[in-house]
Amino acid sequence: MSSATTKYSGKDAAPKQRRWRSDNRSAIWLIAPAMIVLAIVIGYPIVSAIVQSFNQDRVYDAETGFFQEGGFAGFTNYAHWILQDRGGGVNSCPPGTTGSQFWQSIGVTFLLTVVTVSLEVIIGFGMAIIMGRNMVGRGLLRAAVLVPWAIPTAVTAKLWAFIFAPQGIINSLTGLDLQWTTGTWELLSAVIVADVWKTTPFVALLILAGLQLIPKDVYEAARIDGATKWQQFTQITLPLVRPALMVAVLFRLLDALRMYDLPAIMQGNTSGAATTMSLLVTATMRENEYNNASALSTIVFLIIFACAFIMVKVLGANAVAQTQPARQLSTGAPNRKRRGPLQTEPLTTRAVTTKEK
């Protein structure tokens, strides 16, 4: 029987292999247009920016009275940003120039990213739990929550700039006389409030989508088993909603690292206390230092890529862990090593068994 099976498999292998090759060729032709478009709109700008970053900007020739090409510059542009080297050694960039604001802009960007994303996740989680409950007016509540997210970012920035103006609502209600759009911590606080107000609904909707995927039977089984609300939240809700939560964090992390319009409009220009990495790139381009700006853009791209890579790795590991309990519960496979969402299984299993009895 074994030889017959081997013989049959050998005859059937050739048609399967030909069909597999045919499917691969069809797949290549189907994805080729999309790959060409991506290469043009994404690959070419990245490669062009990297090439320009190794060239020197045009320099003025006093003898001829014309600007001339600077030629190959090596890592000079990168040293200008990272080492603050303007040709006179480390930290030779004069104060007030774009080069001297590099590390400050990175600090401001990561500060805004950490604070805004943390607040949006905490507040968004609470909003998602409330919106997920069965109550009167739930549809109206969900539509109302979307209003801040639907408003364009430029309009949001102007709206909060008026609110935080010296004669605005905040100072009028609190009786304070703070310069929210010019002071350092005042401006950063105003940008954080505006960004959290606008983007929290987006995070809440993503988390709500994850909450609605959790079966109600799991909570019912946990209640029968005697689990408290806190145990249900920590051992059922958090582990099972983690994939949607990580996706929301990843999206918001990438957005916050590229934050531009909110601080630019609220502080009125590209240079100030809330200058982010994207604002610094624009400020450098306005000084006609395009090759220098290309080097800065490459550095910003590498920073964002590194953050995204770390997040994707963490997200992928959690997503794999989330799929394990579902397979084990459905197939009845024995439980070996339990971690993360598997901690909910004893509650569920025992509760279901008790209910059946």
Image (spheres, rainbow, N blue to C red):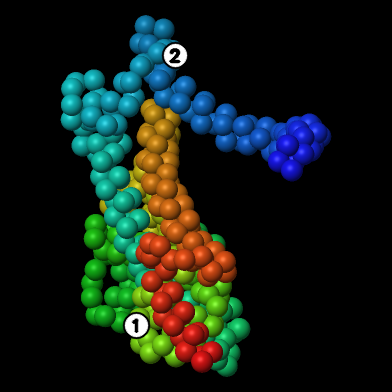
Along the viewing direction, whichever of 268 and 242 lies nearer the viewer: 242
Q: Quadrant of residue 3?
A: top right
User: Is residue 105 rendered to the left or right of residue 32?
Assistant: left
Along the viewing direction, whichever of 175 and 154 lies nearer the viewer: 154
Along the viewing direction, whichever of 57 and 144 lies nearer the viewer: 144
Along the viewing direction, whichever of 160 and 256 lies nearer the viewer: 256
Of labels 2 and 1, the one closer to you: 1
Q: Amino acid at mark 1?
A: Trp
Q: Residue at x 36, y 16 (%)?
A: 73
Badge 1, how many Cα within 10 Å: few under 14, some, many 20+?
Answer: few
Q: From this viewpoint, is residue 97 visible?
A: no
Q: Residue at x 35, y 56 (%)?
A: 113
Q: Secondary structure at mark 1?
A: helix
Q: Position of residue 96 (x, y in %)?
A: 24, 39
Using the numbered discs, state the Cα–Cα distance from disc 2 to disc 1 in whole angstroms. Answer: 66 Å
Q: Residue at x 43, y 30 (%)?
A: 294
Residue corresponding to mark 1: 230
Badge 2, how many Cα within 10 Å: few under 14, some, many 20+?
Answer: few
Q: Is residue 1 above or below residue 186?
A: above
Residue 260: numbered disc: none
Q: From this viewpoint, is residue 183 visible?
A: yes
Q: Position of residue 120 (x, y in %)?
A: 40, 67
Residue 69: numbered disc: 2
Q: What quarter of the picture does the N terminus occupy?
A: top right
